[in-house]
Amino acid sequence: MTPNPGDAQTPEDLKERFCFRGLTFERGSGGLVRAVVSTDSVTGELYLHGAHVTAFRPHGHESVLWMSAASVFEPGKPIRGGVPICFPWFGPHPSDNTLPGHGRARLQEWTLASVWNFDDGGIGLQLQTVIDNFELSYHVHFGRRLELELRVSLPSDAASPAIFEEALHTYLAVSDIRQVRVAGLESSEFIDKVGNAASMPATGEPIEFPGETDRVYAPTSSPCVLTDPEKCRTITVAKAGSQSTVVWNPWIAKSARMPDFGDHEWPGMVCIETANVGASAVTLHAGQSHTMAAVISVSHN
Ligand code: TA6
């Protein structure tokens, strides 16, 4: 049964509608409603606010996603960490600076439409929302891997084509950004947003982090492999339907300027974002859909 967007999504209502072993609903930080997954194979969390995954930990591993201790949890404001959904634009709005950075998808409550069990002991959630003239459906599979799939559709009665940018802005937990490397983008050129957004040639090397890093790699459909020697683990971010990958660490000065990012938290995270931004933005004609997927997995070294 697909609930009407106007249906109340209280923990009590959701428990009644979606009764699955290993899944419950509660009011989390800021009183926002979240789904909590806890099975033999995985634990995870997702807030209906922004359809925001805030935790993913497969059995036998430490938390894979990073969350800021300074994050706010308020309607109309983004959660800092986990996997924010950036849509229908990335970064500042191109022409109206009164509009929220990274679009509206992460600022509004999504509707939980369906839930299902997986053989791997995981749980799948499907959420939906409407933004402008776009219909969005987001599948989240908490299992041995975290599988995310964002499907964007333009209704068949749309009067004209529509263009959007999108990103699954994944924050990964690391031991120390100064010790990790990211492989997979060696042959991709990138825009260096720390510089003056200059277009840079491929480096031929894995990415290391000696300072603030904010790069948009495109075009690239490559998976990224994060190696963390101190945590003795490797995190892989594979993807489909995505031609951009954004890699970001704010370092000292930028994190100090963000009130929802602790001043001393920057060494513990890196963003590897599955995206279609800039020249990779997506155009849909009436009746068309586009799907972007990210699969995040972790292994011991
Ligand atoms: O994805 C990197 C980035 O575009 C950075 O430039 C930085 O602004 C980051 O996103 C976080 O943006 P936010 O609006 O969540 O503070």
Image: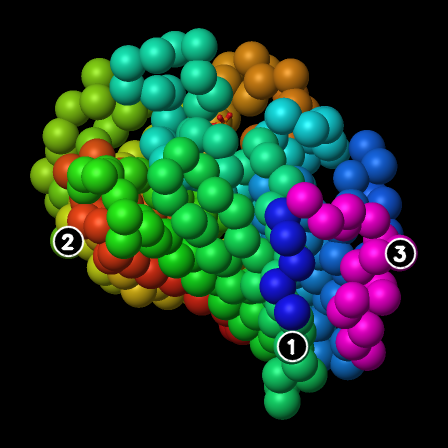
How far is mark 2 from mark 3, CA to CA? 50 Å
228 vs 176: above or below: below
Residue found 83% across the figure and 49% down from its top: 10
Name the residue tied to disc 1.
116
Q: Which residues are magenta?
A: 6-23
Residue found 44% across the figure and 30% down from its top: 103
> In the picture, residue 183 is in which quadrant?
bottom left
Under circle 1, the secondary element is: strand
Amino acid under label 3?
Glu
Out of 28 and 63, give the one closest to the viewer.
28
Give the class, few, some or many, for how many residues have Cα within 10 Å of label 2's Cα (few <14, many ≥20). some
Q: Of marks 2 and 3, which one's residue comes earlier in the chain? A: 3
Kindly report which numbered mark, 1 or 3, lies closer to the viewer in this rendering.
Answer: 3
Q: Of marks 1 and 3, which one's residue comes earlier in the chain? A: 3
Tag shown at residue 187: 2
Queried whether the magenta region covers residue 16, the answer comes back as yes
Is residue 228 left or right of 292 when viewed as pictured?
A: right
- Give the x, y percent position of residue 69: 74, 33
Name the residue tied to disc 3.
12
Q: Are marks 2 and 3 in contact (CB under 8 Å)?
A: no
